[in-house]
Amino acid sequence: MRIFLKTILICSLCLIPLSVSAEVRLFKGSLEVVKTSGGACSDQKNVYEIFLIIGDDGVDTPFFGYLGGNTVTVAQLKGSALDGTLTLRYPYSDPERAEGNTIKFEIKGPVLNGELRDRHLEATVKECNFDLARIKLVQSEDNFAATEIYQRLSLEYEAQLTRSKAMAITRTAATPEAVRLFEKALELADKLYSSQPARLYPYLTSLANAYMRTGQHQEFINLYKARINSINDEAVRNIFDHYQIRSLNQTGRAALGRGEYQAALDNFSQALQIDYKNKDSIAATMSALVRSGRHDEAITFLEKTELRLDSEPDRKDVREAIALVQYQKAKKEEKDGLALDALRDLRKAISLDPGTSYYLIALARWLHKTGQYSEADTVLKRGIELFKDDEPSSKDLIEAREKLRLTEIILAKIRRAGF
């Protein structure tokens, strides 16, 4: 008998109707664990409250029902006679996990005394089986409770089995069929655990994982919006927040690729509301603003972001991003013939990110274009001295200075010729 590690309560639920002719018998009692197996059985040799519910819906066998309880995993029960050997099947798609379990009762009036035997598990398996347990049950005359518990246990079994089938599919590949089963499992679990949101977490995380693996980001966004307020477990919330940021960034990037800049920015903004430090969301927001020509807005956004960050390395990264935007803005201004504005913004980029030699090379070229060769050469000369210990940057600066010198020689000859 596999067990849950957290106690649950019986809840009211949307009942699955039984056939009119169905006879349902309810037995209540206890299960005393004698022997366990598996690697997750610490302190599990206890006495558990359980229910045995028998109906006449069995097709192949006269006795069909469920064995379960508030803290034990539900099992489907079948057999030819109540005082014979009944088989138990747990809600797993894998026969190795589901089958090989039996229960045998001795009937004494309204009392059932029984012995449960589960398939033995090796210690390396991270589950817990009750290899041997003693059961004592007494029949209840509460017909309403019998019907309700039958419906609850059958629905619980179906929900867990559906989730198990979906998980079996995802072991080899994430497919739309697995997603459909996870959605169905959550739908069934919702009927069971509407007042117990914690019991829904395994179903929610399974479906969330499936959406992410199949790239159904909008479906996950919808799931997040519908469920996040009901999730109180920090670990589960962290998973959902992480997936939501990924989904919003992915959806935003797709919109950006279509040129839908505001839609992209709306998605990135939502991601930043969850985690204002998320580097992907920060970079994506900057990219969307720059690509839409809103350089000043990008700079303002990054400046505000820098003020909110605690880590100096993170702030340095943002300053370098601001420098890049200043450079992009300067390039646009230079192209539009606004030479002085371009030089001003390029100098801002250099002051924010003095460790990027390319900005110095760009500044020298633009100074030269405005007829300021001496100033351009000075910029490169100082750069070479500044980056003397950085071989790649130093090499680029030396080559740029030499090209600038040769260009100036040619231009000087042209000017002397009167052209």
Image: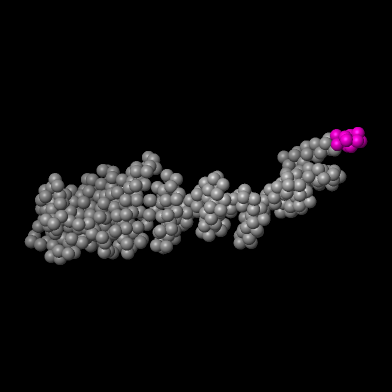
Residue at coordinates 63% horizontally, 60% vertically from top-left?
A: 304
Q: Nearer the viewer, residue 116 or 361?
A: 361
Please indicate, yes or no, whether residue 156 appears anywhere in the rendered image: yes
- Residue 387 visible at all: no
Image spot of residue 119 (x, y percent):
24, 47
In the displayed structure image, the side of residue 50 where residue 366 appears, left or right:
right
> Residue 369, how many percent across, how many down?
81, 43
For the residue pair 109 and 202, the one nearer the viewer reads as 202
**Residue 140 image-quadrant placement:** bottom left
Task: Identify the residue shown where x is 37% and y is 57%.
Answer: 201
Residue 299 counted in the magenta span: no
Q: Residue at x 52, y 46 (%)?
A: 254
Helix, strand or loop: magenta stretch: helix
Residue found farthest to the left: 109
Q: Position of residue 290 (x, y in %)?
A: 63, 50
Magenta region: 409-419
Classify residue 289 as left or right of residue 396. left
